[in-house]
Amino acid sequence: MIAAPVDAAALLAPLLASDQYWRGTLAMSALTVTVFAFGGLYQARRHVSFLDELPGLCGHLLAAAGVVALIAGLRHDSVEYVAGMMRGVAVSAALLILGRALTLAVVLFARRRRWVEHNAVVLGSGPVAVELARLMRRYPSYGLRFVGCVDSSARMREGTSLPLVGTFDDLGKIIDLVDCDVLIIAEPDCHEPDLMELLRRPECASRDLWAVARLWGSRSQGRQPDHIGAIPLVHVRHVSLTGPRWALKRASDMVFASVALLLLSPVLALCALATLVDGGRGIFFRQERIGQYGRRFDVIKFRSMRPDNDQESKTNWSIANDRRVGPIGRFMRRTSLDELPQLWNILRGDMTVVGPRPERPYFVEQFSAEHPDYAMRHRVPVGLTGLAQVSGLRGDTPISDRARFDNYYIENWSLWLDVKVLLRTVAEVFRGGGR
């Protein structure tokens, strides 16, 4: 909470002495804080060490300074101007490193005095859990207060040296009861699918989640390791688009949909005319679909086929070479032009640009019963295009494969992943790889 403001103050400090290079100083400050945020330098850590953070700080600082120096060199022909600005950048960097050292010292001091600590519940009661509990009690520098373990009923009956505050069935109530902030997974007596289902519940997903890395060499390369008393921990990312992440995605959706509607308006007009010629009146096709958290909405498409009746429209699965699809409709479906009116759904907030494709209520109920992970797709808004679709999973393809790709997208979301899916979607349109 204090690292980012201190970093920003250190980077802006040269402005107190001179405002000659104020544009470069502001650019350097904004870029550095952004690079630090994306580089994970503002994420919570259990083991706090200035020397551990120093290489990452220096590397990200050099990258930001290099970009600023390059831009300054392109804008100003004067070597003296660039050199003067970079002297200010060097002062900012030195102050930032000093400020980060002081910040971490303050954090450690507050933890050791137990002024700042978070209630932690350990999932499991085996030997690793016993050791974690001992370490958290003995070393307050990790900022955690051990309040108990949660495990299966069978292991509770066997007995353990740890205070078991309940079973997995009671976890939601226990979190509220002990005001739990942190969950640590350490050898729970529970099948992994059941554990994942438990941790996806809202009361668990809103907590800071860590897991003991059991497999040798399982630490991700390029990421700073973390631990409690040399027991390696992995910080499990949140798997829902909320807060700033959702604000960023929604803002990009609004910009993309607005620009696309404007630029593609001639294409939309041609598609409307072609649909009118092919099938007569009734250019647009509206159909109820399931969106985020199971909410229902009407998706808008260009009509590409004529179902026999309304019930057939709700319950029949369309496949390749469907007899109900005419030649123009077949072309529009193959190039995904029939999906373009959904840009209006995106502006309304019913959908997002990239996400799991929306499905009809009848099939959502059927697929959710047959495939346990299918319903988890609805943690986020449904999309105009998705990772499953650009990976070849369209039309008559296995639903389990689609669900797996959709959940992978949700749990690994980034703005760049959205860009990659969009680029692959454009390639699919030109290749005619649609349904």
Image: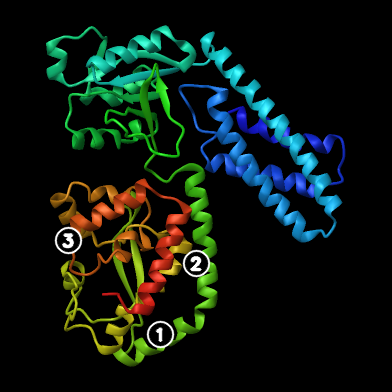
Q: Which mark is residue 398?
A: 3
**Element marked by disc 2:** helix
The alpha-carbon separation of the residues under discs 1 and 2 comes to 18 Å
- Name the amino acid, label 2: Ala
* Front: mark 3 or 2: 3
Left or right: 408 with respect to 314? Answer: right
The alpha-carbon separation of the residues under discs 1 and 3 comes to 32 Å
Q: Nearer the viewer, residue 293 or 110?
A: 110
Where in the figure is residue 311, as x and y percent of width and height? Answer: 17, 70
> What residue does disc 1 label?
272
> What residue does disc 2 label?
257
- Name the amino acid, label 1: Ala
Where in the figure is residue 203, as x and y percent of width and height? Answer: 34, 31
Where in the figure is residue 307, as x and y percent of width and height? Answer: 20, 78
Considering only order in the chain, which callout, 2 or 1, is on the residue closer to the N terminus?
2
Residue depicted at 12% across the width and 18% down the height: 154
Residue 339 showing in the rendered view: no
**Element marked by disc 1:** helix
Q: Is residue 435 above or below residue 26?
A: below
Residue depicted at 37% across the width and 57% down the height: 355
Looking at the figure, which quarter contains the N terminus? Answer: top right
Q: Nearer the viewer, residue 25 or 53?
A: 53
Q: Nearer the viewer, residue 262 or 306?
A: 262
Farthest bottom residue in view? 277
User: Label 1: few (<14), some or many (≥20) within 10 Å?
Assistant: some
